[in-house]
Image (spheres, rainbow, N blue to C red):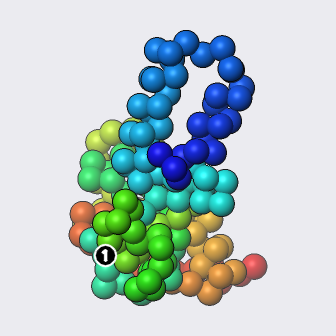
């Protein structure tokens, strides 16, 4: 709850006349976000900790387009490896993942179908597919499309 004190302060100061029931509901919702590893502090807005999403053998730092299990939602992320003593590896005294994934975008598509072609190429969403290739060039980072344990190395754009 300490990490989410900023969010609580914003919510409670916007409406000081919250009923006890509303206050309790908000506290439970913020607690659920904290348990899901969402940080709502301004310095860490929208940072989600992950375990490398099962792709710890890929280089870090990297950019990735990671499809969910159903292939309907694609998360565009910057993945970095944390040092052994980085405080972001801990939550409530428990040592967590050595990776951190910073969301850079998210695309949804109609359900059905596979994001992986017969040739093994993993599709990229149009907008985020363009963004990752531009960012790969500007940040000089490798980029990957990921789905169900498979990784496909992306090629950056050859023009500016």
Is 26 located above or below residue 65 in the figure? above
Q: Nearer the viewer, residue 127 or 140?
A: 140
Q: Can the viewer see residue 22?
A: yes
The image shows residue 43, relative to residue 158, as above or below, that is above
Q: Residue at x 46, y 58 (%)?
A: 48
**Is 146 in front, or is 31?**
31
Q: Position of residue 97 (x, y in %)?
A: 34, 72
Q: Quadrant of residue 136?
A: bottom right
Q: Residue most toward the right?
A: 160
Q: Quadrant of the C terminus?
A: bottom right
Where is residue 133 drawn, in percent x and y? 59, 73
Q: Position of residue 153 (x, y in %)?
A: 41, 80
147 is higher (above) or lower (below) than 8: below
Residue indicated by mark 1: 55
Q: Position of residue 96 (x, y in %)?
A: 33, 69
Residue 126 appears anywhere in the view:
no
Dot 1 falls on a residue whose secondary structure is loop
């Amino acid at each position: 709850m300490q990490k989410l004190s900023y969010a609580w302060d914003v919510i409670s100061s916007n409406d000081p006349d919250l009923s006890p029931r509303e206050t309790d509901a908000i506290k439970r919702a913020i607690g659920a976000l904290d348990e899901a590893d969402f940080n709502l502090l301004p310095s860490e807005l929208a940072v989600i900790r992950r375990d490398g999403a099962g792709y710890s053998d890929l280089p870090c730092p990297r950019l990735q387009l990671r499809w969910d299990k159903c292939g309907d939602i694609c998360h565009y992320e910057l993945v970095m490896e944390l040092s052994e003593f980085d405080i972001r590896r801990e939550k409530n005294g428990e040592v967590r993942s050595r990776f951190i994934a910073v969301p850079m975008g998210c695309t949804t598509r109609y359900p059905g179908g596979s994001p992986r072609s017969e040739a093994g190429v993993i599709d990229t969403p149009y907008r985020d597919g363009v963004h990752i290739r531009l960012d790969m060039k500007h940040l000089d980072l490798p980029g990957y499309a990921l789905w169900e344990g498979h990784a496909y190395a992306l090629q950056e754009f050859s023009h500016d």
